[in-house]
Amino acid sequence: MFSKILIANRGEIAVRIIRACREMGISTVAVYSQADKDALHVSMADESYCIGGAQVSDSYLNMAAILEAAVVSGAQAIHPGYGLLSENAKFVSLCKKCNIEFIGPSAEMIEKLGDKDEARKTMRAAGVPVTPGSDVIDDIALAREKAKEIGFPLLVKARSGGGGRGIRRVDRIADFDNAFLSAKAEAQSAFGDGAVYMEKYITPVKHIEMQLLCDKYGNVVCLGERECSVQRKNQKLIEECPSPAISPELREKMMDAAVKAAKAVNYENAGTVEFLLDKDKNFYFMEMNTRLQVEHPVTEMVVGIDIVHWMIRIASGAKLTVTQDRIYMHGNAIECRINAEDPERNFLPSCGTLDFIHIPGGPCVRFDTAIYQNYTVPPYYDSMIGKLIVQARSRELAIRKMKMALSELTINGIQHNRNLHIDILSDPEFVSGEYTTSFMQERQEKLEKKKEQN
């Protein structure tokens, strides 16, 4: 087991990993930007090193500075959290050259699954259902003809990257050329790779993901699914476990497909297979995330397994001691992402000093965050400042508990989306469990129409 781990991240996930390390008796090393000198993860870690300026390119994406901090501190491993360098194959390779263990899959695995075109081919060969579409096409004339074969609507998608960038929906052939070229340009700018492919746009659809743990000895367990269909501009807002749309029989089929996906590439460590589920309960492989997911706590709350602990154990060479027949779901969990933004002003990011905060408590209520009273939310980073998670015996009780916890959550000094979450949880479509990925867009359109009528 490692004796010292460097956390190459910031905010709530850095705090989350530091706590896991403390529980395991492992010393921690924090890295931080000049803007984060007063951040909670800096004071919580056993050692802290400033690695550059406020911009992520100068600090949290500064591979040389992070590795230097790891070497100087004597850290044996690096946990990347999510985002930033968590799926950067070059960084993983550099860790290996410095004899530092990367807590996650290998560089080769990240490259293979990060290439969404290659991942689709691999999954198809393994017998995992894949959304109808094309391989990578560079020539616009050939792409246009293939688009006609696939049929509209369709998606033009970047081969690399994620986060909703490099994706364009096309509803008719007249719009295809512009969408194809703009997706390529955005992908090139965001990921340094302008390659794109096409997928049939399936609607209405749910976004379901399966959580996996895979050790170095070929053992794989699936911890069940998460429902992630409440999204705004391809960014998740609310996640729940289990999905209200999944029957036990369908869950078994999807879990089996997720395990096949992992074994097809000899995957190691924690990973997530993302599926699209259509109205007829057909599911299709979308992508595999080679990192810890933001929404991992809902799985932990329902299954009772600490995913971060297992990431560290697997990276250190431990075998999985949990087996598939011992994975049970207990009740329901919901997670709401608390973002520093103003929903009333087109989700304008908000920053400032928190002059008062109150965090809800009680049985099975969890708030993963790095904020504290008098903390100043900086303007340089992602707007998420916390994740509120609850667990209860049933979905109905979990919704009720989350609404209660949200009403108690108080954060003064900035704008945030707490009230939006309360409204969503009260929406009959959400309560029914039949909502899809178009839920937020349709909800916004209804609100705008109502305003016009008034």
Image (cartoon, grey):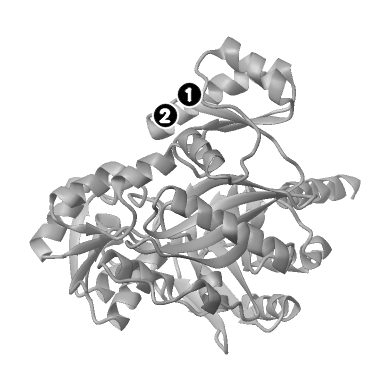
Q: Position of residue 96 (x, y in %)?
A: 18, 51
In the displayed structure, does residue 126 sit left or right of residue 307?
A: right
Q: In the displayed image of the protein, which residue is found farthest to the right?
A: 453
Up/down of 91 relative to 359, above or below: above
Q: CA distance from mark 2 to mark 1?
A: 6 Å
Q: Type of residue at label 1?
A: Ala
Residue visible at 17% across and 62% down?
49
What residue is rendered at 52% in x and 59% in y? 340
For residue 189, which numbered disc appears in the image? 2
- Give me the disc on residue 300: none
Could you tell me if residue 237 is visible in this image?
A: no
SS at mark 2? helix
Mark sitting on residue 185: 1
Residue at image point 51% right, 25% down: 136
Foreground residue, 77 or 372?
A: 77
Q: Is residue 134 above or below residue 353?
A: above
Rendered view: 343 above or below 90? below
Q: Amino acid at mark 2?
A: Ser
